[in-house]
Image (tube, rainbow, N blue to C red):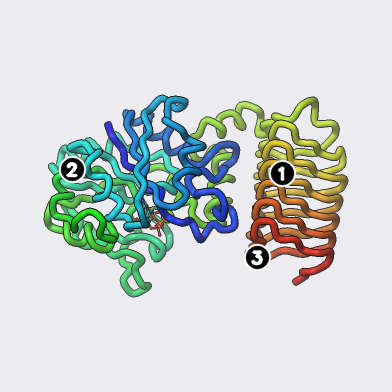
Amino acid sequence: MQALILVGGQGTRLRPLTCATPKPVVTLVDRPFMVYMLEWLRAHGVDDVIMSCGFMADGVREVLGDGSALGLALRYVEEPEPLGTGGALKYAEALLDERFFMLNGDVLTDMDLTAQLREHERTGARATLALMGVEDPSAYGLVRRGPDGSVRQFVEKPSPEEIDTNLVNAGAYVIEREVLAGMAPAGTKISIERDVFPALVGEGLYGFEAEGYWVDIGTPKRYLQATFEILEGVVHTAVGSEVQRSSGVLWRAAGTRNGTMVHAPAVVGAGCELASDAVIGGRTVLGPGVTVASGAHIDSSVVLDGASIGSGTRITGAIVGPEVSLGEHCRVEDGAMLGRGARVGSGNTLTAGVRIFPGVELPSEAIAF
Ligand code: GDD
Ligand code: MG
């Protein structure tokens, strides 16, 4: 079975993590995000994957290669300019089979694609959308269905008064190639959600209510949520199982814990050096080669490879990018994000979703609010 994965978005809502790293290969816990998707697809019989890239295609290819390490064949299609979610589909037409999965490339899920495919066959649909129930559909595509499961309306990013169901487009479709015949010619910028699906209503567009875990990792809040839920085993993943098997603390650093308090669930990467009176976790990921100085306290956070954390610094609910250097007695909390290589002097307070861009240097006590 074939799958087309859209990975051409710029990932602006995840900046600065996505300033230099394309969203599909941003590290989630201990591996590039896309690896979770590919493992899930392979488990549902997918062996042929086309990555539809626009933005930073080389960065994706460099990390994922030809897919052989993951047991599937990976090919890349590069749009000359972003063509939108519909344009990207049309642009890949020459490579597509008669029937294929199409996926948004920023969703962490363990839902049952095989069941969706069966339902697609049963109804004889031309396209079947996986649907998920969410609390607030406003950031998604809202889907209204008839009693037979056919889609009656598709409303992308509905306004509050349009919301009358919690079922949204989960970004996983089964599509018959014939659907492409009715689309605008290749090279036209179109949205599958705004242009293609609404036109398919009444023409064989069905919705399949999926079950299981599902989160779009495309915002800092949801990126952290996905991290926590992998660590807690709420979503079934290989690294999550490893954490569970290690009684909640996956310790990859050399030697023993040396007295450092590490609360579950947590992952401590290879080559980390932690002061004996530092406190780590729970819900915390330290990437490889992170150093944490005396008295520092990190919880509910992600600290990526090679970052160094000064003594007495406290990090809660934040994302610290690779190679960041954080001085002493800083507070970093509440959705703050630090981009690769940022250097933050001592005594700063970074909170309330503040974003420090890659390479920025902040002197001591420059920000406190
Ligand atoms: N190749 C290519 N070209 N890919 C693109 C382009 C493009 O021009 N634009 C976006 N993409 C990719 C993104 O990289 C992402 O993987 C996927 O298409 C969806 O784009 P997002 O920008 O993440 O959309 P969204 O999250 O606001 O909404 C979409 O996903 C929701 C579920 O997560 C819609 O499909 C909603 O209907 C849906 O509910
Ligand atoms: Mg998205």
Q: Is residue 270 above or below residue 313?
A: above
Q: Secondary structure at mark 1?
A: loop
Q: Earlier in the sequence, mark 1 or mark 3?
A: 1
Q: Position of residue 150 (x, y in %)?
A: 17, 53
Q: Position of residue 293 (x, y in %)?
A: 84, 45
Ligand 2 resides in the quarter of the picture at bottom left
| Pointer 2 local density, CA inside 10 Å: few below 14, some 14–19, many at least 20 | some
Kind of residue at disc 1: Gly
Kind of residue at disc 2: Glu
Q: Quadrant of the C terminus?
A: bottom right
Determine which of the numbered discs, if any, sits on residue 145 in the image: none
In the image, is 84 to the left or to the right of 215? Answer: left
In the image, is 32 to the left or to the right of 310? Answer: left
Q: Which residue is mark 1?
A: 281
Q: Nearer the viewer, mark 1 or mark 3?
A: 3
Q: Secondary structure at mark 2?
A: strand
Disc 2 to disc 3, how far (Cα)?
A: 44 Å
Disc 2 to disc 1, how far (Cα)?
A: 47 Å
Determine whether label 2 and label 3 are within 8 Å by CB.
Answer: no
Determine which of the numbered discs, if any, sits on residue 176 in the image: 2
Q: Which residue is mark 3?
A: 354
